[in-house]
Each structure stands twice: as C-alpha cells, then as structure tokens.
Image (cartoon, coloured by chain):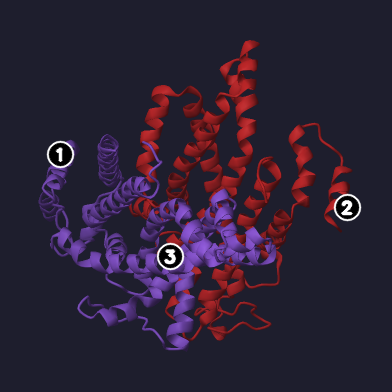
Amino acid sequence: MLTYSLKRLAQLFVTVLGVVTLVFFTMRMIPGDPISAMAGDNLSGVALDKMREQIGLNEPILMQYLHYLGGLAVLDFGNTVTTKLPIIQLILDALPITVAIATGTIVLTVLIAIPLGTVAAYMAHKGHKMLDNAVTGFAMVLDLMPSFWTSLVCLLIFSLALGWFPASGTVSLNDPAGLLHRIALPVLVLSMAQVATMARITRTSVLEVLSEDYVRTARSMGWSELRVLFRHALKNAALPIVTVIGLSFGNLLNGTVIVEFIFTLPGIGNLLVGGINSRDYQMVQTLILFYALIFVVINFATDLGYRVFDPRVQF
Amino acid sequence: MTQETLALSARSLPRLNWPRFRGAGRLLANGHIRLALAILVPIVLLTIFRPVLPLPGPLDTDLRAMMQPPSLEHLFGTDRMGRDLLSRTLAGVQISMFVGFAVALVALSFGLIMGTLAGFFGGVIDRVMMAITDIFLAFPSLLLAIGLVSVMGTGMLPVVLAISLSDVPRFIRLQRSLVLSLRTRAYIDAARTVKASQFWLMTRHIVPNTIAPLLVATSIAAANAILVEAGLSFLGLGIMPPAPSLGNLIRDGQSYLEQAWWISTLPGVVILLIALGLHFLSDGIRQVLDPRSRK
C-alpha cells in the first residue's frame, strides 16, 4: 500500500511537472507579443522594453523557465500584470467560493442521484422497463443540457419570474445563510449536469449487486426490501459510485467556470475568464496549473480511496 | 412497419460485397438509431437548405422588427438588431456541425493510428504515448480548450484544434486498450503462422474489430465537441460575432433575459436536440455492432 502510494505520488509529480512545462512553453511560443497586447498603442520603444524587463521576458526562454520553476518551488506565482497584486493572494481569496459551490454540488448530486439510481435499478430488476427507461431517459436529457443554457433557463424561471433566488449580488463567507441563498442556483444547475452520470452508474452497479447471491439470501431471511436495498446492495455497489464522485470533480472544474461567469460569483473560474479577457498570461498560467493540480490530486485520492471501500483491491 | 418486416425488407436491399455493408439494414432497424435519425435528419436538412428557405439571411438586420417574440413571420423571433433568430440558429448549427464533424474526424484518425501503434508495438512507444496522454488527460476538456484558445486566439481553426486536443488522448487510450485485448487472440497467432506481416495484421485483423467501439466513441465525441464549442463561444472565446454560433446567440440574449427570453432559450433547445440525437446514434451503433452488448 505504501509503495503504491509513493509510486503514484511520483507519477503525480511528473504529470504536474509536465503540465507546468507544457503551459509555460505554449504561452511563450505563440506568435505575437503579449507585452504589446497588454500595453496597447500607448507605449512603444523604450517603455515597452522596460515592461519586458520587469516581467523578465527579455531573458532567454530557458532562463525564464528555470526562474519560473524556482519561483514555483517557493510557492511564488508572480504578480498579475494588470494590478501587480500577488496572484496567489487573489487565488486564495477566490478559492473558498469555488470550493463552496463544488461541495454543495456534490452533496446535492449524491442526495438526488443515489436514490434515483437505486430506484431505477430496482425497477429494472423487477422488470418494470417503462419506469426504468423513463428515469434513465430523463437523466440523459439532463446530462446533455449545456450548463450555460440551464443556468439562463433557471435564472429566467427561479430568479426573474418567481423571484426565489438572487441573480447577482455580494458573496461573503461570513454570512452562511446569504451565501447558501446566493449559490443555490449555480449549485442546482451544476447538480443537474452531474446527476445523470451518477444515477446511471448507481443504477448499473446496484443492478449487478441485486442479482448476487447474498441479496437472495437476505431476502429469503425475510428482511424487508428496504433493508435489503440500503444495508446490503448499496454498500457493495459503492465502489464505482465513489469513482464517479471523484471523476465528476473534473467535470465540476469545467462547470464552475461557466456558472461563476453567469452568476457573477468571485471564484477562480471567474478569475480565469477575467484573466484571459485582460490578456493576463501570468494569471491564466497559474490558474491552469492550479486546475491541473486539483484534478490530479482528486484522482489520486480516489485511487487511494478504492482500498478503503474494497479491501480485496490489490495493487 | 414492425421490426421484423423492416429488417426483412432491409435484407432484400441490393447487397454490396463488402461484408460490413450487410449491417446497414440492421442499423436502420434499430430503434435508437431511428429515433436519432428522426431528430438529426430534419435539422441537417434545414441547415443545408437554409439559403433557399424563405427566411431572411442570418446577417440581415431589420431595425423595424427588433426584439420580436416568436411569431408566424419570425418563427424564433428576432434579436436586438432585427435579425431573424431561426435563420441565425440554422447558420449556427452549420458551424457547430462542422466543428463537431471536424473534431470527431481528427480525434478518430489520430487516435486510431497512434493507439494502434502504441498497443501493437508496446515498449518505449507505448510508454511515451501513455505519459503524454496522461498530461493531456489531466485537464477537463473545457479548461484545456480555454487555455489553448487564450493562446491561439479565437476562430474556427483554434477551436477545432483546442477541442480535438482533449479528445485525441482519450481515443488513443481507447484504441490502445482495444488493441491490447485483441493482440493475444488466437487468430492473430494463426495469421502469424502463415507469415502475415505486421501491417497486414494491423489493418486486416485488428483495426476492423476495433471500429465498432470507436464509432460509438466518435459519435459521443462529436456531441461533446458541439457542446464545448458552444460553451467557448458563450464565454466569448470561440466563434466571434457577427458570425452566428449557437453559443454566441445564447450569449447575445443574456443581457435581455427578461425582455426577450427567446434569444437565449431557443438556440439552447437546438443544441440539446443535436446532442440527444448524437447520443441516441451512438447507443444504437453500440447495440447493433457489438455482439456482446445487452440492451
């Protein structure tokens, strides 16, 4: 177990290093000059050179790379070009919002998808194909709705027409109730996209388990269907479901960018879009690195989590 | 027509000698595929024949008819410059379908070739390929596309490249795993005993047996590409106005959500329909071509 973890950690490190290098060189290999893009038509000649020097773009590219790596090693991600604030500070300020949205989404998704999938599996097991197909079909449609469209439709219905939720406004972690009210719609939208996949995996997994011998034994012992379903079937079906929860984090990283943009929430997704629109390459670079890191770490944690859920899993 | 009569009449179609075409009748008999075609064919036809339909052009503004709700004259309503939304939606569908098709084609070809090489030859090639795909798979597709577009700029080519870049590794992985599972089959060894070359083995034995799952994945990749492109255009990072893209149109309507709900909602319905159609298509292909799949 320990050797496996260490091996995977090493793999993780190599992957992240690869991502960092890829992002770094791609950003600098583009034709065109980011400095003039940022400065616009106002600066030229000496002023432009001075700006270049400030950011360190006048050095040979390998030196820049080494400088960058050196900075990363001491967790110095540089400053934004536009406001000269340390990037890491901006990211850390924005991260809690995104984490709140992500956590809320996963909680809501699990609360909806697992019962839904279990019911669908039960229907399929008993042979009610109509109901099973209906649930699965409904989940598929939810899955395919683009999240920005769903957001706007939800805005229309719940915010503008019914007035239940706000469409914009301040967000503060000091006000949990207000925060929940504010992120309720984005969380709803993101959950709708995740519920489908999770419900489908739950359904498949529970269906498989329902035809196992130990379920038959439990039934023959006279236990109620509910007890059979939830105490035995679900526990053994948990492993693929946990995998999907881990994987859906990746999809969440996609989704938060869009909902933060639409609902104007100051999370890291919004930072990314803002950074791209203002040609702030340092910011974009660091954020993409962050995203990759989060994604890789979650996958790693999911991998390790396998062992916890199924002691039979050998590495 | 019942399933059996349709299948029977399909069998009486002129048969082409290429073995794979005998499956065409079975393809059409499948319920999922029929549903998919029922959704996709009308949309594709409307898109292709849009120039000859009695609709205003997608770029024609009509300032006397701004922000009109859907009516008999403008079936989808108009936007704030008086442009007919249905016409713009169909033009957007054209662009989306092109992107979807292009991405699917690129992902399929690169994935097929590189995955087969990696799986068949193994060793260093395989390990290098896996390391590289690992790096790209470390990104959710929209983020990778955003990153690339921020570097390459907006427009059709960067968008296609950006989206394919996240699909190609997936296809390589898929093809590689398929090839690995086929490589040890008895018929490969049998072919080797009669001095079949590597190339022959790959093209005549392995690839035809991996086509079916690849086609399923291609259909889904196309649907995904359309959704990602719409997302990029919505964020202002894909196809730029005034060229209409489904994502563009939804973005246009965002500021007028209360006054003109149709600008944002209707193009989204079209995106949904196309994605649904492609998914049903992939489901159907999987059911028909994979002898081991159960319904």
**Nearest-to-viewer mark from 3 and 1:** 3
How far apart are the two marked residues, 2 and 3, measured between alpha carbons?
A: 45 Å
Task: Identify the mark at residue A86; answer none if there is no mark.
Answer: none
Residue under mark 1: which chain is it in? A
Residue under mark 3: which chain is it in? A
Left or right, B211 with reference to B160: right
**Nearest-to-viewer mark from 1 and 2:** 2
Q: Secondary structure at mark 2?
A: helix
Q: Is the residue marked by circle 3 packed among few (<14), some (14-19), or many (20+) residues within 10 Å?
A: some
Question: Does the residue at mark 2 contact the one at mark 3 (Cβ under 8 Å)?
Answer: no
Residue farthest front in this picture: A221
Is A93 located above or below residue A161 in the figure? above
Give the amino acid at mark 2: Thr
Name the residue rendered at 52%, 62% in the picture. A229
Name the residue rendered at 65%, 46% in the picture. B286
Q: Secondary structure at mark 3?
A: helix
How far apart are the two marked residues, 1 and 2, measured between alpha carbons?
A: 70 Å
Residue farthest bottom in this picture: A162
Residue for badge 3: A110
Q: How many marks?
A: 3
> Chain B drawn in what color?
red
Q: Position of residue A128 (x, y in %)?
A: 68, 64
Task: Identify the mark at residue A66; answer none if there is no mark.
Answer: 1
Left or right, B201 with reference to A17: right
B15 or A182, which is in the foreground?
Answer: A182
Residue for badge 2: B5
Q: Which chain is purple?
A: A
Q: Position of residue A260 (x, y in %)?
A: 34, 69
Give the amino acid at mark 1: Leu
Name the residue rendered at 64%, 52% in the picture. B283
3 or 1: tag closer to the N-terminus: 1
Q: Are marks 2 and 3 on the same chain?
A: no
